[in-house]
Amino acid sequence: MSLKGEIQANHDMLEDLFEAVVMTLAGESSQLAVWVLDDQLNFSQMKARRIGAFSPFSESKSILAGSGLLIKLTRENVQKILPLFRENDYLGYQILHLQIESQGSLQFAAYDHFCVVFFGEQISLEMLERLKQRDIIQDYSIP
């Protein structure tokens, strides 16, 4: 698996962490899998595909709670996703888990409302240091 380290998220700044990550990883070969508590969020503008509990990514063997959706993580979709996730603090409450695959490998994974967060090679140490300086994350580690 291409995940290389763990992030301790600042739960007051989840939207900023999510924005930084999706802006870094967005592209034609990127996909976002998201598992939500209920279907109150409207993903129709992004042509989301239902995936159920199983992760759609070959590197992940995860079976996750909630209703799963798969969305192409294009720059256009990012501009639609960000306001949707910021609205009513959905990112911290309605979003149970999310995974982002970019260029064929898992690059970001957040589970249990961002209690456990992993990152891959495409998330640079420089980016993590900037996020830490801005208190968007508390810390990060590479085993």
Image: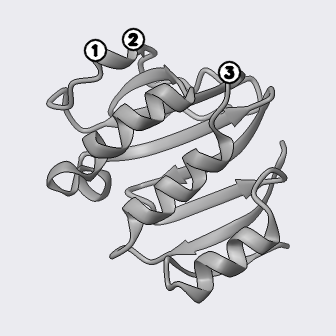
Q: Quadrant of residue 72?
A: top right
Residue depicted at x 27% and y 52%: 86
Name the quadrant of the N terminus. Answer: top right
Q: Are marks 3 and 1 in contact (CB under 8 Å)?
A: no
Q: Are marks 2 and 1 in contact (CB under 8 Å)?
A: yes
The secondary structure type at the circle numbered 2 is loop
Mark 3 vs mark 2, CA separation in Å: 14 Å
In this orientation, does residue 65 appear?
A: no
Q: Are marks 3 and 2 in contact (CB under 8 Å)?
A: no
Mark 3 vs mark 1, CA separation in Å: 19 Å
Hey, what amino acid is under mark 2?
Lys
Residue depicted at x 80% and y 63%: 124
Name the quadrant of the C terminus. Answer: bottom right
The secondary structure type at the circle numbered 3 is loop
Hey, what amino acid is under mark 3?
Glu
Residue depicted at x 59% and y 53%: 21
Q: What residue does disc 3 label?
A: 28
Q: What residue does disc 1 label?
A: 44
Q: Is residue 78 above or below residue 45?
A: below
Residue 131 in the image: state x and y as whole percent: 60, 76
Mark 2 vs mark 1, CA separation in Å: 5 Å
Q: Residues within 10 Å of mark 1 (few under 14, many from 20)?
A: few
Q: What residue does disc 2 label?
A: 47
Hey, what amino acid is under mark 1?
Ser
The disc label shown at residue 33, or none: none
The answer to which of 134 and 34 lies nearer the viewer is 134
Residue 140 in the image: state x and y as whole percent: 69, 77
Task: Judge depth for marks 3 and 1 and give the one in front.
Answer: 3
Residue 39 is left or right of residue 130, and the answer is left
